[in-house]
Amino acid sequence: MKWYNHEHRHSGIKFTPHERHTGRDIEILSARALVYKKAKLENPKRWSGEIKNWVHINEVHLNPEKGKSEIVEIRRHKFKL
C-alpha cells in the first residue's frame, strides 16, 4: 500500500496519489514543463513537435465512461463472435 500511494507514479495522473492529495502535483508538473522547455531550447533538432503535455488534470476517473460510438462498436463486435 505504501509503495502504491507514495512511490508508484500513476500514468493517469502523472505522479503519486500522495503527491496529488498533498497538493504538490501542480508544482511537480510546472517543474517538469520547465525541464522540457529548456531541453527543447537547448537542442531543438531533437524535437519534432511540441513538448509533452504537462497540464494539470482536475478530475481523474478510475473507469471513465466510453463515448456512445465506442459502446455501439463494442456491441457490434460482441454479436459478430
Image: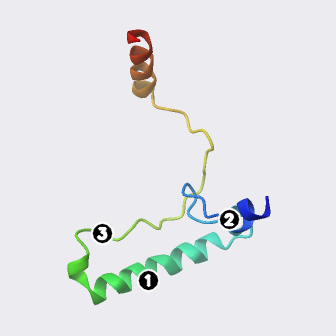
- The image position of residue 79, as x and y in percent, is 42, 10
**C-alpha span from label 3 to label 1:** 13 Å
Which residue is under mark 3? 50
- The image position of residue 40, as x and y in percent, is 31, 81
Q: Which mark is residue 19?
A: none
| Quadrant of the snapshot with the N terminus | bottom right
Mark 2 or mark 1: whose residue is earlier in sequence: 2
**C-alpha span from label 2 to label 1:** 20 Å
| Tag 2 and tag 3, C-beta contact below 8 Å | no
Colour convention: rainbow
Residue type, numbered disc 1: Val
Which residue is under mark 1? 35
| Tag 3 and tag 1, C-beta contact below 8 Å | no
Mark 2 or mark 3: whose residue is earlier in sequence: 2
Residue type, numbered disc 3: Glu
Relative to 58, does residue 54 appear above or below in the rendering?
below
Rendered image quadrant of residue 19: bottom right
Residue type, numbered disc 2: Arg
Rendered image quadrant of residue 34: bottom left
Mark 3 or mark 1: whose residue is earlier in sequence: 1
Rendered image quadrant of residue 76: top left
* Mark 3 residue element: loop
**C-alpha span from label 2 to label 3:** 25 Å
* Mark 1 residue element: helix
Which residue is under mark 2? 20
* Mark 2 residue element: helix
